[in-house]
Amino acid sequence: MIKAIIFDLDGVIVDTARYHFLAWKRLADELAIPFTETDNERLKGVSRMRSMEILLEIGGITMSETEKEKLANRKNTWFVDYVERMLPEEIYPGVKPLLEKLRQRGIQVALASSSKNAKTVIQLLHIQELFEVVVDGTMIVHSKPDPEIFLLAAMRLGIPPKECLVVEDAEAGVEAAHAAGMRCLGIGSPEQLFKAEKVISKTGDFTMEMLHEIEEKDKIGKLED
Ligand code: G6P
Ligand code: MG
């Protein structure tokens, strides 16, 4: 029944979620905004500008659009610096063999990341050829939790949404998957990602048996017509 798996990138394929956090933290420190890893959960999966707004909300600061863009660009410069120093070995253990195995089993594999840096990251990791379809932050208007990115990935794969499984580490990503009418496998803590059909701590732990288990589950109640 599940014919395609759509993977998020940051925090699912590679630990770039850490680099996003470090770059936002550096900006938060400069602005004297208290910013913790718990606060950072709200930034995962959402666009750069929305993240900027959430950070300012946390600090109770208002500023002009121009100023916001300038600061978001600064954060991006630091993020890109981290990414450019990243090694292909930084891909999470077991992920590359997993992607290869899924394709061998006839399951289509796509990447759907809100990041405008997604293509650079997968090129640095030498994994671009493992995805049949890649959609990123440059191709969408609304970022997660809006379902746009996952619906675009499904359309490009030519697979109906209810036959797609999303793999996500962000709450906004789980919500986006469900809004698209797709099941979701969460990567991280079950407390954080309780809305997902199943949660595991590492992407590399995924097994084909889990796929069958997830096929039996439907937390949004509208997948089985
Ligand atoms: C992903 C990450 C977010 C990041 C967003 C935009 O969804 O999870 O933390 O803010 O992409 O990334 P970008 O590289 O375009 O700033
Ligand atoms: Mg992510």
Image: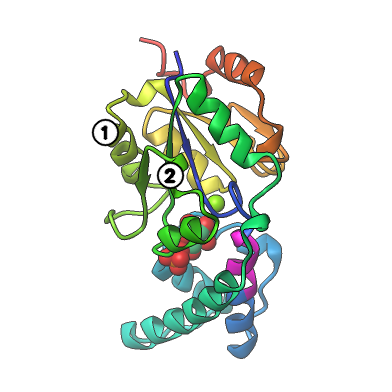
Assign the N terminus to one quadrant of the image.
top left
Mark 2 residue type: Glu
Mark 1 residue type: Met
Residue ID at (66%, 44%): 192
Residue ID at (60%, 41%): 96
Kindly tell me whether residue 79 is visible in this rendering: yes
Q: Residues within 10 Å of mark 2 (few under 14, many from 20)?
A: few
Q: Image height check: is 133 above or below 1?
A: below
Q: Residues within 10 Å of mark 1 (few under 14, many from 20)?
A: few
Chain-order first, disc 1 or disc 2? 2
Residue 21 inside the magenta-drawn segment: yes
Expressed as whole percent of the image width and height from the top left, the position of residue 51 reads 48, 67
Give me the disc on residue 155.
1
Pick whichever, 171 or 62, lies toward us: 171
Q: Main secondary structure of the magenta part?
A: helix
Q: Is residue 218 left or right of residue 67?
A: right
The image quarter containing residue 154 is top left
Expressed as whole percent of the image width and height from the top left, the position of residue 43 reads 54, 61
Expressed as whole percent of the image width and height from the top left, the position of residue 52 reads 46, 73
Q: Image height check: is 48 above or below 126?
A: below
What residue does disc 2 label? 129
Residue 156 inside the magenta-drawn segment: no
Q: Which residues are magenta?
A: 16-22
Give me the disc on residue 84.
none
Q: Image height check: is 81 above or below 36?
A: below
The answer to whether the residue labelled 1 contacts the one labelled 2, judged by CB atoms less than 8 Å apart, is no
